[in-house]
Image (cartoon, helix red, strand yellow):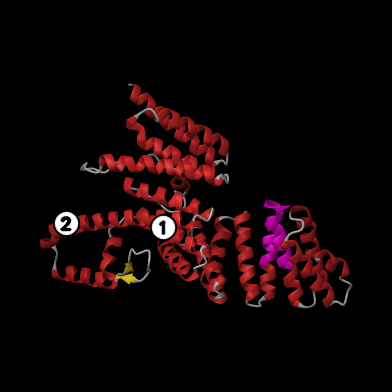
């Protein structure tokens, strides 16, 4: 009776935590999950729920910008999960998944996920930790956790492949020769990426394993590739970043092409191509399709504004200034509502000003936007290199009209 009461209380707190989180009430969500920790910490039978609570707290703290707190909570969750695996590794049945975590709940309407097995849940926690460590540039630690997640997934895929092969052997006698030939033909054509952190070449030997895994497993694999791609991007290795981000994007393109999950992945690939100077590919293949998805999926949001800015920047590099200006202006409209008085807004004013300057006959408009950027930057980041750069852009525009720019040149010095 007492265990039933505790289980019911855990479920209620879980529901309240998810509801508070979905409404953006981070502090309330934290209270519910911390109460959930207290309720489960004294019971060995509730260790999986305890790990889930610590993980959710870690995800909330990450959203709030408390990266160190997030890392502590995720490491605690991982320690508990690993102890569960170690204690139960000899059992015939794997531990059942815990209650839904916040990120899984958040994706239900996006990619039709089914619950992860417990070992893949552990892999997912490794990825959550890798993501936070990447944000604070602890890149080697991040890569280590991402690689552990990859290895767990490889083991799971191997196990599922063996189970599938066993079922096929049992059914072999009932298969007609024609069906078997077709199956072999598909197997030869199917390829997947080998599980090596050193390379991303294709390997037909591991191909059939992806056919036997769940959709949730495939999304987790895509997430792994994307996080490894981000780690390499932050390390400045854009070739490896492009390889891994592209692999993640291929999976999302196949299984959820009209979702925010896909658009985020496509944007990541596009931004890497942009950094590599491959502007046309970045725009046509990734940034433009991602923006089209977001126009419908997340209208009137700051994320959409950032996507307009990204498209504007690559069009600017392609010297398609009118199109770039249109995207920058749409970004400005949204940022003026959702991110006013911010450095993000300053940058967009600067982008618009420099685009007007490049058009050649719009210097008055260019100077208006440079001045707006300067007004904000002098308040937010005085004496900064970024402010000096904006002074320089205004000076260039004024001199293009043979106007006196002495005031701004003095400020640059």
Q: In the displayed orientation, state which residue is furthest to the top.
A: 1
User: Disc 2 designates what residue?
Assistant: 166
Give the x, y percent position of residue 258: 48, 60
Residue 339 counted in the magenta span? yes
Could you tell me how far apart the alpha carbons at marks 1 and 2 are, in whole angstroms?
Answer: 28 Å
Nearer to us in this view, 340 or 343: 343
Nearer to us in this view, 386 or 224: 386
The label number, if any, that marks residue 91 in the structure image: none
Left or right for 116, reference 357: left
| Range of residues picked out in magenta | 327-352
Q: Residue at x 45, y 67 (%)?
A: 246
Q: Residue at x 38, y 24 (%)?
A: 5
User: Disc 1 designates what residue?
Assistant: 224
Q: Locate the C terminus and report the quarter of the image it occupies.
A: bottom right
Give the x, y percent position of residue 385: 72, 63
Tell me if mark 2 has few (under 14), some (14-19) or many (20+) residues whose alpha carbon lies within 10 angstroms of its own.
few
Q: Locate the N terminus and report the quarter of the image it occupies.
A: top left
Mark 1 secondary-structure assignment: helix
Look at the picture and state if 303 lies above or below 276.
Answer: above
Please identify, in this view, whether the residue under mark 1 or under mark 2 is nearer the observer: 1
Left or right for 184, reference 53: left
Q: Residue at x 72, y 55 (%)?
A: 336
Res 323 visible: yes
Look at the picture and state if 28 lies above or below 276.
Answer: above
Residue 79 counted in the magenta span? no
Give the x, y percent position of residue 8: 39, 28
- Magenta stretch mostly in which secondary structure? helix
């Amino acid at each position: 009776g007492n265990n039933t009461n505790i289980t019911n209380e855990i479920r209620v707190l879980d529901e309240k935590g998810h509801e508070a989180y979905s409404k953006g009430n981070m502090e309330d969500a934290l209270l519910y999950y911390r109460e959930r920790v207290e309720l489960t910490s004294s019971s060995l039978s509730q260790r999986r729920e305890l790990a889930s609570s610590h993980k959710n707290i870690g995800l909330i703290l990450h959203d709030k910008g408390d990266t160190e707190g997030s890392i502590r909570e995720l490491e605690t969750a991982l320690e508990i999960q690993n102890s569960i695996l170690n204690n139960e590794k000899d059992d015939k049945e794997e531990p059942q998944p815990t209650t839904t975590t916040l990120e899984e709940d958040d994706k239900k309407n996006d990619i039709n996920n089914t619950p992860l097995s417990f070992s893949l849940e552990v892999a997912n926690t490794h990825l959550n930790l890798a993501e936070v460590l990447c944000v604070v540039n602890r890149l080697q630690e991040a890569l280590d956790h991402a690689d552990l997640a990859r290895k767990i997934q490889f083991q799971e895929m191997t196990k599922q492949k063996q189970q599938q092969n066993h079922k096929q052997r049992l059914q072999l006698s009932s298969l007609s020769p024609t069906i078997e030939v077709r199956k072999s033909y598909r197997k030869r054509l199917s390829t997947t990426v080998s599980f090596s952190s050193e390379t991303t070449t294709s390997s037909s030997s591991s191909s059939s394993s992806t056919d036997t895994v769940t959709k949730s497993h495939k999304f987790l694999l895509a997430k792994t590739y994307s996080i490894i791609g981000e780690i390499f991007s932050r390390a400045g290795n854009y070739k490896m970043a492009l390889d891994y981000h592209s692999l993640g994007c291929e999976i999302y393109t196949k299984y959820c092409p009209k979702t925010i999950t896909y658009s985020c992945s496509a944007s990541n690939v596009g931004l890497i191509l942009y950094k590599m100077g491959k502007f046309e590919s970045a725009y046509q293949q990734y940034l433009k399709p991602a923006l089209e998805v977001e126009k419908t999926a997340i209208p009137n949001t700051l994320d959409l504004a950032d996507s307009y800015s990204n498209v504007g920047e690559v069009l600017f590099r392609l010297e398609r200034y009118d199109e770039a200006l249109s995207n920058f202006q749409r970004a400005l409209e949204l940022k003026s509502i959702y991110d006013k008085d911010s450095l993000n807004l300053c940058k967009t004013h600067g982008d618009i000003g420099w685009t007007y300057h490049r058009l050649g006959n719009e210097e008055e408009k260019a100077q208006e936007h440079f001045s707006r950027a300067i007004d904000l930057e002098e308040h937010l980041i005085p004496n900064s290199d970024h402010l000096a750069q904006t002074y320089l852009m205004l000076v260039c525009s004024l001199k293009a009209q043979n106007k006196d720019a002495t005031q701004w040149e003095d400020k640059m010095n």
